[in-house]
Amino acid sequence: MSDASLNALAAQLAAKQVSSRELAQQYLDRITALNPSLNAFITVDADKTLAEAATADARIAAGRAGPLTGVPIAHKDIFCTDGWLTTCGSKMLHNFVAPYDAHVIQRFKAAGMPSLGKTNMDEFAMGSSNETSYFGAVKNPWNTAYVPGGSSGGAAACVAARLAPAATGTDTGGSIRQPAALCGITGLKPTYGLVSRFGMIAFASSLDQAGPMAPSAEDCALLLNVMTGFDPNDSTSLERDKEDYTRDLEQPLTGLRIGLPREFFAEGLNNEVAASVEAAVTELKKLGATTIEISLANSQLAIPVYYVLAPAEASSNLSRFDGVRYGYRAPEYTNLDDMYCKTRAQGFGAEVKRRILIGAYVLSHGYYDAYYLQAQKIRRLIANDFTEAFKSCDVILGPTAPGTAFKLGEKSDNPVEMYLNDLYTIPANLAGLPGMSLPCGFDSQGLPIGLQLVGNYFSEAKMLNVAHQYQRATDWHARVPEGLK
Amino acid sequence: MKWETVIGLEVHTQLATQSKIFSGSSTAFGASPNTQASAVDIALPGVLPVLNKGAVECAIKFALAIGATLNRINVFDRKNYFYPDLPKGYQISQLAKPIVEGGVLTFLVGDTERTVNLTRAHLEEDAGKSLHEDFHGMTGIDLNRAGTPLLEIVSEPEIRSSAEAVAYARALHTLVTWIGICDGNMQEGSFRVDANVSVRPVGQAEFGTRREIKNLNSFKFLQQAIDYEVRWQIETLEDGGRIEQATVLFDPDTGETRMMRSKEDAHDYRYFPDPDLLPVKLDEDWIESVRNALPELPAAMQLRFQSEYSVSAYDAGLLTGSRALAEYFEAAACACGQGKLVANWVMGELSATLNKAELDITQSPVSARQLGALVARIQDGTLSGKLAKLVFEGLWEGAGEVDAIIEARGLKQMSDSGELEKIIDDVLASNQKSVEEFHSGKEKAFNALIGQVMKASKGKANPAQVNDLLKAKLQ
């Protein structure tokens, strides 16, 4: 059961070989056994999960099942979930029980997929190692001395350890793709606007996008079918016809033009990662693809641009956490200002405070033009580079992260080094483009390596096709850590 | 030294939409605290704003009504500051690209026409309310008002006195209620005025340092606050002091303004475009359909009243004080074809009676048709002015239609000269003293005789006719 694909699980449910309740119980048992060493979940509530599974079973029995009805899924604790603790990995929301469902949660509920619980994450999705969570660091299932990546580290770890067949994640600067790479699973960040942000606790609104995380591209395609679609509650949600993201999975790759950005294979890239990614390119060529070298010159500015824009938006988005209406409030204070100061000083962790300070600074009077406005202009240039590149290629390929998982604590004292982990993933967020990460090998220490695909706007089906064909030819995505099988 | 006052007004008008500007909650006033606050209004984690098109349409109407430029692409910004009744920690407003720019407002100050240019008008959301009185040692927060749409209308600093400021504010109040974008209820905070006030020596080109008086919710307070502030600023300067830029509050109990915060405490609002909202695009078809649905505006109606009904500019101004009043006047005038006379009745007897009863024109027990019928009976000689007032009283009491009241109460003016002559003869016979006085040259005695005749006729005699007949008989 533990390495079953979503299609396989759905088939077993349809054939009544297993009930949704039984399936959910199997995963809950696995969570009980393995989560203490991984810390991938913040909240597990077996009663709620089993009740949802029972509802799914009733649907199946009544012949009203959808393609994934009864298959359980884990949700990142950034999605408001009615009746569930929704913490966003922060002390600030350690006691916040959401009174409503995020759009993404609504869709999975409508699809009849029971929730296995809420996965751990970097506080307010700010981090690349999952070490900033108020609920403790998540461990990488491949080696628990190592980080799983972040911010969707709990989601990546729980899928890698098969504590859940699939999980939801969110990606602002690489928070789906980088942990997917570091944990050896597949994760996709859709085109900005394809998945509603309603009910997803905002970090940087113009960059945040939810997406699926699962062992395979095929699984991700099925999940994307559930997640995407117009939502009138999100003004940045795109109104377009519903797509079936599985439609092109089996297409051959003959004639596929892969763009290789020279900037993504330059200084700073770990040799073992480079070798694995190059081997993957060779494999794709065998499947009929051709390659072309491209340039994304302005992508080198992606990190500084991102660390102006994302904190700017975050500093404003996180203002609502003021101790007045919900969440944490300092126990003692002398007046209103003191209540604000103590609540926010005690309720936010160091990384969140750092970004709020940076954000407030770049938006402040006299600095706005030099930082925020300038960063917006460069953001446009970075997007323009992609538009130009897609004139000569169908998909862009490179490493997801410059290296493999690093040790817990190794980079936590050096924020800039930590930020460099998102060097290759941030440009897609800035441009609003879809990107995905898929496993393409292991380093000498047995840690997974991920390759990244970046597609043109709305080319998710094409990217999934490329990833699926690669996964048919390889088995990196099917591997499970020793001892967790 | 002679001083000149410089005033610019910022008016927050609550827009008369059913629901809030970024959520579906009701905007109705007076509900129990926090019963009209949705997840979006409370700013729960994860919620997002969705723009209410109705609010945008209100802004379009306003722009068309003042001849302003409508920015075909306009942008919502976040204005960041912390306050307990500002749930998100930022207010969604428009800074760099407001929906409305420019425009003019023309109005009368006494008999003099004034034109003030507008700088801009932008859409934003209202905050909630902090209730300091109701909870001992604590502050209550009511978020019912949070997210109510506002159009903030900013004038150029072209206003030069408190009287002008009040006239401007009244004209603006008339306009926004006229075009139906605001209910104009000042007690409920639907129309709130901030006044930026400074003084400078007459002849000086640069402005003095301004202080902003916040949240004036009546025209009376607006006048009092500006008058106090101007006196205070002049006295301060003449005493050798300096004016520091500040935000002040007006206390109606003391009639004084007091400092709320100085420039040093001023917020850095860290404005930036709201990434949750797309730029608003106004297409031409939309603008045209709004234009076609606009009612005739007060300025145009004033000109028309002057030419069609021969009323003075001043009267036309009064008659267009509200759309309801103007419509009433016009309906009554059309009913009898006597615009000038109807105008006198509307601004005289009707207004006075309504004021006394504390009713507004829409609640008048006397309909426009009835007033028209009444004026028609004056015009055709059936009623004297005095009798007409009696008929008006009957109308007010709901005693029926004009002719029925005249009939039932016997209020028809006496037109039979034989009957009148008999009354005059009786009066002359029984008032010999007055007759003698008249003949000895006392003009007053003639008026006394007329009074006696009117009395004897129970007011039904036609005064002009009495005058003529009496004169003839005394010669």
Image: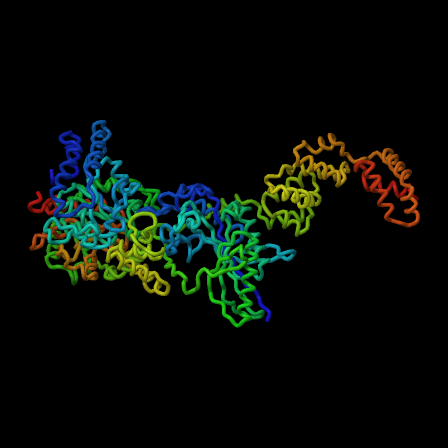
Residue A457 image offset from top left, x and y in percent: 27, 49
Q: Quadrant of residue A164?
A: top left
Is residue A56 depicted above or below B329 in this figure?
above
Residue A192 image offset from top left, x and y in percent: 28, 49
Asked if residue B426 can be seen in this view, the reply is yes
Image-based side of A178 in relation to B465, left or right: left
Residue A288 image offset from top left, x and y in percent: 14, 48
| Residue furthest top in the image | A62
Q: Quadrant of residue A485?
A: top left
Asked if residue A151 can be seen in this view, the reply is no
Image-based side of A385 in relation to A443, left or right: right
Q: How has the structure been colored for display?
A: rainbow
Residue drawn where x is 76% and y is 34% of the image? B411
Closer to the camera in the image, B226 or B88: B226
Q: How many marks?
A: 0
| Residue furthest bottom in the image | B240
Residue A140 image offset from top left, x and y in percent: 13, 50
Residue drawn where x is 67% and y is 35% of the image? B395
Report the quarter where the N terminus of chain A lies. top left
| Residue furthest front in the image | B136
